[in-house]
Image (tube, rainbow, N blue to C red):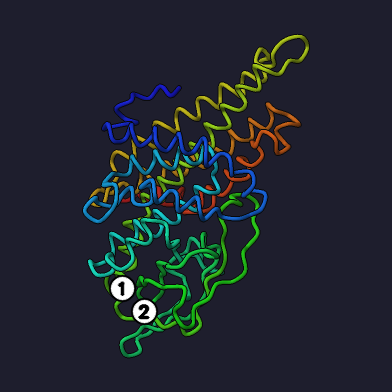
Amino acid sequence: MPSLPDRLLHPTDEHSMLRDTVRQWARTDVERQAMEHDQAGTLNVALLHKAGELGLLGVTIPEADGGAGLDAVASVIVHEELAYADPGFTLAYLAHALLFVNNFYYAGNPAQRARYLPRVLSGETVGAMGMTEPSAGTDVLGMGTVARRDGDHYVLDGRKTFITNAPEAGVFVVYAKLDGRLTTFIVERGFPGFSTGAKIDKLGMRASTMAELIFDGCRVPQANLLGTEGGGITNMMRNLEIERLGLAAMSLGIAQRCLDAMTRYAVERQTFGKPIAEHGQIQRYIGESFARVEAMRALVYGVAATVGPQHRNRLGTDAAKLFCSTAAKEVADHAIQVLGGYGYCAEYRVEQFWRDAKLNEIGGGTIEAHQKNITRDLTRA
């Protein structure tokens, strides 16, 4: 059980009820389908729709607009609990609920919200975000996708890659350069000149899918400008902090799952006439893993309490994502070592969590990017 005070994990009764709801669903329905979709490399779209029925796709959206009206702490709770059962599905959830829904809502106008929110909050339409490019990942300002004006439309040309939910999504938040300035657009799958590439195979997070977005003279109505021309940086930075908290919370869920798995196994497995939990080498793996999990939880929830639409904490969210992504991979590695051959095989699923953990050192900002950002902020005069 976590030692962090409950008031930090659950500031209100709504947060506590949210965790109970998500945990019950995650450890039954989400857990049951996890191995199947990891092995097949497919997104369970029906399960994402169920998340909509449970009200989980708009956790950070005001109640007046159909959301739950909760905060970054609530988002962290959902991502932690879902990742404990299925990190791959949770990544698809994050791409929908944060990279599209949260991003879109706080940049959109009332007409855009009325048009798109109902179908993405219900899960009827899957959402995604297009930012990363084949030659421009962390270097966002180096992106090559461009937009130009053409009457009452914008015309987009370029490519995005490694886009989570791309094969299934019906609507996308897309970043492009308009007159050299980063600008955001809402692109629907059916727009002329837009298509997606073949599904990209990957090491982990296989229960979420990804593909390229291809813009070949893609015509986007003027009404689908998201925010203002040149306002893409503002939109991106507003959403970046809650995205990084979501990924840090996923790392926490992964680490907690691996800690639980190795602890149970160490009690049950015997060598040389006693449970392996009594061997010093195993105690080191379990003890260090527990310490990491507790530190992750304190950092993620502490930072989440400081983040909101009007409250920024870039330094804290960079630190949370940096520490938690690496710590989760280390805890997963410890779990494999404690389980030995069983850890390397699929039965206990720790090998899946090890594969999944690696993504968080890359996606949503590499660990090197976080190190750079933190150093720059700390040394800024």
What amino acid is labelled 1 in the image? Gly
Q: For numbered disc 1, what is the local secondary structure? A: loop
Write the residue at 36% across / 49% down. Answer: 242
Q: Is residue 8 visible?
A: yes
Q: Does residue 132 lie above or below 51 as drawn?
A: below
The outermost residue toward the bottom is: 151
In this view, the residue in front, 28 or 73, is 28
Q: Does residue 114 lie above or below 381 as drawn?
A: below
Label 1: which residue? 230
Is the residue marked by circle 1 packed among few (<14), some (14-19), or many (20+) residues within 10 Å?
A: some
Write the residue at 33% across / 47% down. Answer: 59
Q: CA distance from mark 1 to mark 2?
A: 7 Å
Label 2: which residue? 178
Q: Does residue 236 lie above or below 74 as drawn?
A: below
**In which quarter of the view is residue 7 placed?**
top left
Residue 14: percent from the left, percent from the top? 28, 35
Residue 88: percent from the left, percent from the top? 55, 48
**In which quarter of the view is residue 8 placed?**
top left
Circles 1 and 2 in contact, beta carbons < 8 Å:
yes
Is the residue marked by circle 2 packed among few (<14), some (14-19), or many (20+) residues within 10 Å?
A: many
